[in-house]
Image (cartoon, rainbow, N blue to C red):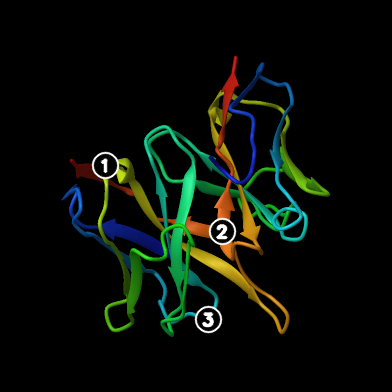
Amino acid sequence: QLQLQESGPGLVKASETLSLTCTVSGGSIISTSYYWGWIRQSPGKGLEWIGSIYHSGATHYNPSLKSRVAISVDTSKNLFSLKLRSVTATETAVYFCGASRYYDTLTAFYLAWFDPWGQGTLVTVSS
Amino acid sequence: QSVLTQPPSVSAAPGQKVTISCSGSSSNIGNNYVYWYQQVPGTAPKLLIYDNNRRPSGIPDRFSGSKSGTSATLGITGLQTGDEADYHCGTWDSSLSAVIFGGGTKLTVL
């Protein structure tokens, strides 16, 4: 059974870089079935997709965050990581990692549903 | 502000039926599959519906999904107190090339 677990600092200073890791267990990160992604949820707000990565290193990012985000994968350790530069206090949120299915045809590509999700980790950005 | 529009809250009595709407546009719901997630406060979202109307293994048939044009609907019948949660719709936006979500709907079972 595939499981994901986030880890990283719970407190980051404004203007610095937020770094998180998601460790995958119960399955291989080089599975051809999944993209691996990050989603965040500010207190009392909805979900916001940050970006996703394939085991090959191919990435897709939220256009609104693309200039500050980097997602990488370490297949030897079965994990993937998030770096978000120049954070502000408004980016205090619970950060989730998740496995998403995808559709990749000759005419279209898109990411589909996320399942499973990690339990989430609260990151507070101090101003 | 979310690209997909959901009502902030809905409520109904135990045993009753409730529907939650999710409104989008031709670049997202109109041409892509819709997904629904259930999130009990303090926990991670859980997949309820994928590909508009399909239920993952273990999800009871009290939960159903449908789509028409640029809107989607989640239906829950035989409401139970354990159904109290936030419900989120999601899809792919072909213009943004991004996963997008609604703002979430809080379900209260009175």
State whether residue A113 appears in this view: no
Dot 1 falls on a residue whose secondary structure is helix
Residue at mark 2 = B99
Q: In the image shown, does A86 or B58 lie closer to the viewer?
A: A86
Give the CA distance from mark 3 to mark 2: 19 Å
Q: Residues within 10 Å of mark 1 (few under 14, many from 20)?
A: some
State whether residue A62 appears in this view: yes
Q: Is residue A103 above or below residue A90?
A: below
Residue mark closest to the camera, 3 vs 1: 1
Q: In the image shown, does A1 or A32 lie closer to the viewer?
A: A32
Where is residue B27 shown, x and y percent of the image?
A: 71, 58
Where is residue A36 shown, x and y percent of the image?
A: 44, 68
Please name the amino acid that badge 3 sits on: Thr
Residue mark closest to the camera, 1 vs 2: 1
Label 2 resides on the chain identified as B
Residue at mark 3 = A32
- Residue at 48 percent across and 61 percent down: it is A62
* Quarter of the figure with residue A16: bottom left
Where is residue A53 shown, x and y percent of the image?
A: 44, 73
* Quarter of the figure with residue A23: bottom left
- Residue at 38 percent across and 53 percent down: it is A96
Marks 3 and 1 share the same chain? yes
Residue at the outermost right position: B68
Q: Quadrant of the C terminus of chain B?
A: top right
Q: Is residue A66 left or right of residue B21?
A: left
Q: In the image shown, does A43 or B45 lie closer to the viewer?
A: A43
Label 1 resides on the chain identified as A
* Quarter of the figure with residue A105: bottom right
Give the CA distance from mark 3 to mark 1: 37 Å
Q: What label sits on residue A89 in the rendered view? A: 1
- Residue at 35 percent across and 65 percent down: it is A69
Please name the amino acid that badge 1 sits on: Ala
